[in-house]
Image (cartoon, grey):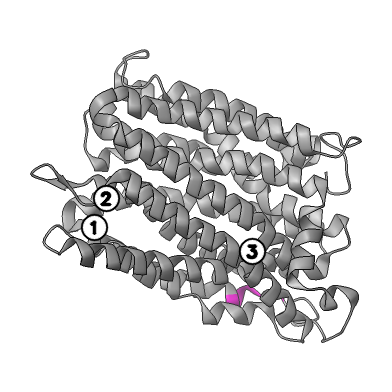
Amino acid sequence: MSITRYLLFFCGQVGMMGLARFLYQQILFYGDWDIEGTRMFPPIALGLVFLSFRIFDGITDPIAGKLSDTWVRRGHQRRTLLWFSFSLAPIGLGLTFVSNHAMPQALAWFLLTLGLLVFFVGYTFYAIPYWSLVDDYSGGNMQTRARLSNLLGLGIVVASAIGFVISGLLIEKIGYAMAATSFSGVAILLMALPFFACPDKKGIAKQPAHNDQAGAISLWSGITKALRHRKFLALIALFGGSQMSFTIMTAAAPFIATSLLGGSISDVALLLGPLLGVAIPCFLFVPRIQRRLGWLRSMLYASLALALVYACCGLLGQDLIGSPLLTAALVFGAGGPMIAILLGLEAEGVVDCAREREAENMLGVYWGAFNFVVKILNGIAILLASILISFKESWGDMAIRSMGFLAGGCLLAGVGFHFLIRPPAEKAGSGAGD
């Protein structure tokens, strides 16, 4: 693939994850936004609603995966599915943040829930075929597949930089509704571009229609087959812990900036700027680390190290190194290398597990099963964060500090469950793709 095509593929992840980062970072702070002591939405109620939609989102993932695989088996190009969904998630984000205190409470809740519904339907039916293009566009070339996987991870970090840094500045200047609309407009353009990243027309983007055993398998049978794959389950446990920790710290960032450091929502950029500034160049070394340690061992080491960093976030607000802000910047920056490794190897792990079982024609189902579990865990993470925020008035800063300890605990739990679930003969660093 040419550099231009890699860039076109990369833009889709930036657009989609930019929307997701805006939502995950701002949703609880948005609900906590008060005028004269009145919250927009009660934190726990908002957390429960968000969890409900994450469960719905997770349930639809295997369906999207099955539809994606069936579409390819019938002789269509998987990339054409992007045209059906690329604009839905941006529209949903705009609806989610259009409410304000001047509206009746019932109308505000209706717009919020409608926006979340449209967002998650669009996110699912875009993400599953898009991520599966890692295998389609690589055409069996391991080096190309590794690069595309790494670009997905890099896209999350770049999108996080946009979501974390720019969202706060826009919200302070033009408000939640206009800031969300601005993000949505840019995302629609970016999410259409991966369609044009197809490297050639010689069997990579389009496969001939055929009826094989994988094609005849039912949706539930495909999910069951994937979730009986112990190495894949162990991978889900590992990434489930890391994704929960990312979600918790994303939601915690505005509260850390305002409550622990005494700044404003735009000061989130001063925290996450160092983290992203360190993480982005580290993506250059992820393929080399993967070749040396294998993707599984790399993820294990990164999870343990990141757990320590997140636990240290629970101590922020003190001038341990210079000022409280400098201390926070250094702590967040220390997580950059581990973020790059975990995000850069996620797609590689899922594709490798599918290929290990000779399930290339079930790649979409594997992605759907993966996201089914991980998205529900992300919803639980938001709920846990909302519970801690609800204790902010009685616990004070300890409610915010507890988010860092919780995020570190999620990573350790993921590593622990990985070792419990993995096949008895499985060793970190072994396997065809490891």
SS class, disc 2: helix
The answer to whether residue 364 is left or right of residue 209 is left
Disc 2 packing (10 Å; few <14; some 14–19; many ≥20): some
Look at mark 3 in the image and give the residue it sits on. Answer: 131
Mark 2 or mark 1: which comes first in sequence? 2
Q: Residue at x 87, y 37 (%)?
A: 426
Look at mark 1 in the image and give the residue it sits on. Answer: 176
Camera-side residue: 60 or 242?
A: 60
196 in the magenta segment: yes
Q: Residue at x 86, y 34 (%)?
A: 427
Q: Residue at x 61, y 65 (%)?
A: 61
Which portion, as a residue range, is magenta? 195-199
- Please, is residue 126 above or below residue 160 in the view? below
Look at mark 2 in the image and give the residue it sits on. Answer: 30
SS class, disc 3: helix
Residue 28, x across and y down, in percent: 32, 46
Mark 3 or mark 2: which comes first in sequence? 2
Main SS of residues in magenta: helix
Q: CA distance from mark 3 to mark 1?
A: 29 Å
- Please, is residue 296 above or below residue 161 in the view? above
Q: CA distance from mark 2 to mark 1?
A: 8 Å
Camera-side residue: 364 or 330?
A: 364
Residue 218, x across and y down, in percent: 78, 73
